[in-house]
Image: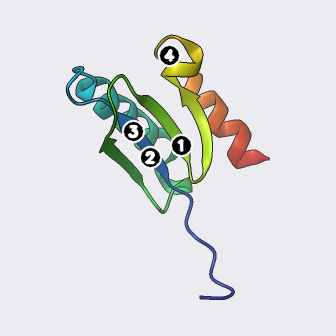
């Protein structure tokens, strides 16, 4: 619909088979606890491809395990989210 903005939302794509569910749930809870008021679209955790652990703000990639070669450090996603929401 024209003139209606989409509510900001976080999506966490994760590999269920790899045992990343607990990490995805923890990150989703941490993000909602800190940013819930600023994310009317909420946080979705979505089982994805093998080895994936990607965090998106709408269509913008905040973190990719594949690109970084590791999982996000404490507060890494949250700090990037602050920058994006303020910018």
Q: Are marks 4 and 2 in contact (CB under 8 Å)?
A: no
Which of 76 and 11 lies nearest the eye of the viewer?
Answer: 11
**Position in image of residue 30 (x %, y %):** 41, 33
Q: Which mark is residue 11?
A: 2
* Mark 3 and mark 1: Cα distance apart in space: 8 Å
Q: Which mark is residue 13?
A: 3
**Position in image of residue 50 (x %, y %):** 32, 27
- Residue 63's image quarter? top right
Q: Are marks 4 and 1 in contact (CB under 8 Å)?
A: no
- Say few, some or many: other residues with alpha carbon within 10 Å of mark 2 (under 14 / 14 to 19 / 20 or more): many
Residue at image location 47% in from the left, 33% down from the top: 54
Secondary structure category for the residue under label 3: strand
Q: Are marks 2 and 1 in contact (CB under 8 Å)?
A: yes
Q: Point out the tag, 4 or 2, that comes first from the N-terminus.
A: 2
Q: In the shown orientation, is residue 86 left or right of residue 14?
A: right
* Mark 3 and mark 4: Cα distance apart in space: 18 Å
Secondary structure category for the residue under label 2: strand
Q: Nearer the viewer, mark 4 or mark 1?
A: 1
Residue at image location 62% in from the left, 82% down from the top: 4
Please say whether residue 63 is visible from this viewpoint. yes
Q: Are marks 3 and 1 in contact (CB under 8 Å)?
A: yes
- Colour scheme shown: rainbow
Name the residue beneath numbered marker 4.
Answer: 74
Q: Are marks 3 and 2 in contact (CB under 8 Å)?
A: yes
Which of 67 and 45 lies nearest the eye of the viewer?
Answer: 67
Question: Which quadrant would the N terminus be assigned to in this image?
Answer: bottom right
User: Residue 63, relative to residue 40: is it above or below?
Assistant: above
């Amino acid at each position: 619909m024209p003139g209606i903005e989409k509510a900001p939302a976080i999506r966490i794509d994760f590999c269920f088979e790899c045992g990343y569910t607990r990490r995805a749930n923890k990150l989703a809870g941490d993000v909602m606890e800190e940013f819930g008021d600023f994310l009317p679209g909420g946080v979705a955790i979505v089982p994805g491809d093998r080895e994936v652990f990607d965090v998106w703000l709408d269509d913008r990639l905040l973190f990719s395990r594949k690109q970084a070669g590791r999982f996000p450090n404490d507060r890494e996603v949250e700090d990037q989210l602050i920058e994006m929401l303020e910018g």
